[in-house]
């Protein structure tokens, strides 16, 4: 289904209108949503996987999943929360599929591959890379996206205590890794 709005009108339209059109199956409206949200989705996925190409692939998977189910969305106001859930679910599915690969990566990271130079040690992405994948997810959701512990627990399906532990330990590890910034 194509919208009656021109491409220029879609670019200028408010989010709720574009989302509502996408919910009716309007492909051009959904494409506009992708343009508006892709940087945020890609950044989120990259923070979790640390690989630009994989982050792009996961972001594409997020939008593909969203397109397939956007007609089920009941309210344009709920779109961003709904999209966030798809992002988290996509990451958790990737993590489950490749758990052994991420565990091996974590072991290699722990041996210093991200500590070769001061620049790498001080780099936030490098510091995040040192966290186990589920802890990284919780830390990114808490500090990057500003979600509360109960919101993260609901979004990820992890027990609240586990979320709190991941965030506390992850934040402590980040503080330790980025300690050199404290002097600046």
Image (cartoon, rainbow, N blue to C red):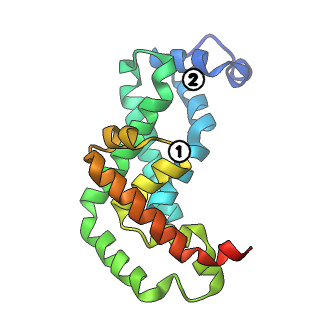
User: Residue 32, image x and y in percent?
Assistant: 61, 29
User: Residue 139, image x and y in percent?
Assistant: 45, 56
122, above or below 9, in the image: below
Image position of 7 (left or right of 86): right
Q: Earlier in the sequence, mark 1 or mark 2?
A: 2
Visible in this render: residue 84? Answer: yes
Front one among 130 and 17: 130
Binning the other alpha carbons within 10 Å of mark 1 as few (below 14), some (14 to 19) or many (20 upward) gives few
Quarter of the image where one finds residue 100: bottom left
Which quadrant: the C terminus? bottom right
Real-space CA distance between mark 1 and mark 2, rounded to the nearest whole angstrom: 25 Å
Label 2, secondary structure: give it.
Answer: helix
Say which of marks 1 and 2 sits in front: 1
143, above or below 11, in the image: below
Q: Residue at 70% x, 25% y: name it.
A: 11
| Disc 2 target residue | 29
Image position of 139 (left or right of 106): right
Q: Are marks 1 and 2 in contact (CB under 8 Å)?
A: no
Label 1, secondary structure: give it.
Answer: loop
User: Residue 183, image x and y in percent?
Assistant: 71, 76
| Disc 1 target residue | 145
Front one among 97 and 119: 119
User: Residue 75, image x and y in percent?
Assistant: 45, 15
Quarter of the image where one finds residue 64: top left
Front one among 83 and 168: 168
């Amino acid at each position: 289904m194509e919208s009656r709005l021109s491409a220029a009108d879609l670019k200028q339209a408010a989010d709720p209108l574009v989302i509502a059109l996408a919910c009716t199956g309007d492909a051009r409206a959904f494409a506009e949503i992708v343009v508006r949200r892709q940087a945020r989705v890609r950044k989120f996925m990259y923070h979790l996987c640390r690989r630009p190409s994989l982050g792009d692939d996961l972001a594409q998977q997020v939008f593909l999943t969203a397109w397939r189910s956007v007609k089920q969305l009941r309210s344009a106001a709920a779109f961003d929360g709904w999209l966030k859930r798809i992002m988290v679910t996509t990451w958790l599915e990737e993590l489950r599929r490749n758990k052994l690969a991420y565990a091996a990566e974590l072991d290699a990271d722990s041996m210093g591959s991200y500590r070769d130079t001061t620049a790498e040690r001080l780099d936030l992405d490098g510091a995040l890379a040192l966290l186990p994948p589920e802890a990284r997810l919780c830390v990114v959701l808490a500090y990057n996206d500003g979600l509360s512990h109960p919101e993260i627990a609901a979004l990820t399906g992890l027990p609240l205590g586990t979320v709190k532990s991941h965030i506390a330990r992850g934040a402590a590890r980040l503080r330790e890794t980025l300690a050199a910034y404290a002097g600046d």
